[in-house]
Amino acid sequence: QQQVKQSPQSLIVQKGGISIINCAYENTAFDYFPWYQQFPGKGPALLIAIRPDVSEKKEGRFTISFNKSAKQFSLHIMDSQPGDSATYFCAASRANSGYALNFGKGTSLLVTP
Amino acid sequence: DVKVTQSSRYLVKRTGEKVFLECVQDMDHENMFWYRQDPGLGLRLIYFSYDVKMKEKGDIPEGYSVSREKKERFSLILESASTNQTSMYLCASSPMGTRTEAFFGQGTRLTVV
C-alpha cells in the first residue's frame, strides 16, 4: 500500500513555466518530507526537503509548500528549464523506521524548449 | 565525493537461480537500504539495515533476504529468482540521525528469464 500518493504521473511544461507536483500522505508519524530528482540511468538524488514545522522552503527555483493539516505537500519549479526534465519523487519518513523513505510513484517532467 | 557502488549495472539470471546483488558505500554510513523501482510504482523498500548484522523488513520483503556483515557492505539475496523479480534495484545509504539525506547507487537492472 502506497503511503505517499503523488500526482500527476507525467507533466509537460514549456520553458519558463511553473511545474507543480503534488503529494499527500496519511501517516501523521511522518516528520521528514524530501523530494528526489532522478535522471535516466542515474540513481535518485536529494533535491530539497522540509520538516513539518515549516510551511514553505525555497532553494533557488525550487520551493516546497507544506500543509500539515491537509497532510499535503507540493513541489514548485519556477522558470522551468529543459535541464529540469527528469523524474521527481516525493517521499516521507519517520524516526521509528530508521528514516527509511516511503516514496510516491513519481512524476515524469518534460520541459519543452 | 560520496559514493554508493552497486557491483553490476546489468544482470541476466535464470528462474530459480540464487542471485546476489552487492552494494558498497564509502561514507561510513550506519543506514543502508534496498529498493526496487518499477515503472508506475515508484521506489518500494525491500529491506533496510541500521547497523552491522541488523536488518528490518520493508514493504515488499517476500522472496528476498539481506546480509550485512560489514558496515560498508549490504547485500540483497534473491533465494530463487522469479520472473516477477525482474526490476531495477537501487541501494542507498544514509548517516544515523534524524532527517538525513540518502545517497543512492546507480542501480542494477536485473532480468530474470
Image (cartoon, coloured by chain):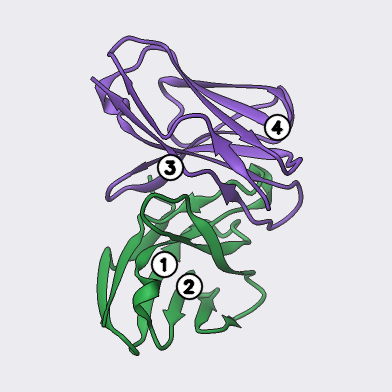
Disc 2 and disc 3 in contact, CB within 8 angstroms: no
The residue lying at 63 percent from left, 38 percent from top is B32
The answer to whether marks 4 and 2 sit on the same chain is no
Q: Chain letter for green?
A: A
The kind of residue tagged 1 is: Cys
What element does badge 1 sit on? strand
The residue lying at 31 percent from left, 86 percent from top is A15
The answer to whether marks 2 and 3 sit on the same chain is no
The relative height of residue A19 versus residue B77 in the rendered view (above or below) is below
**On the image, numbered disc 3 is attached to which residue?**
B44
Please tell me how crowded label 2 is: few (under 14), some (14-19), or many (20+) other residues with Cα within 10 Å.
many
**On the image, numbered disc 2 is attached to which residue?**
A73
Q: Along the polypeptide, which appears first: circle 3 or circle 4? A: 3
The chain to which mark 2 is attached is: A
What element does badge 3 sit on? strand
The chain to which mark 1 is attached is: A
The kind of residue tagged 2 is: Phe
Figure colour of chain B: purple
In the picture, the disc for residue B72 is 4
Position of residue A89 measured from the top left corner of the image (x, y, whole percent): 43, 60
**On the image, numbered disc 1 is attached to which residue?**
A23
Residue B29, picture quadrant: top right
The kind of residue tagged 4 is: Glu
Depth check, front residue: B9 or A71 = B9
The kind of residue tagged 3 is: Arg
What is the spatial separation of the Cα atoms under label 4 and label 1, in whole angstroms? 33 Å
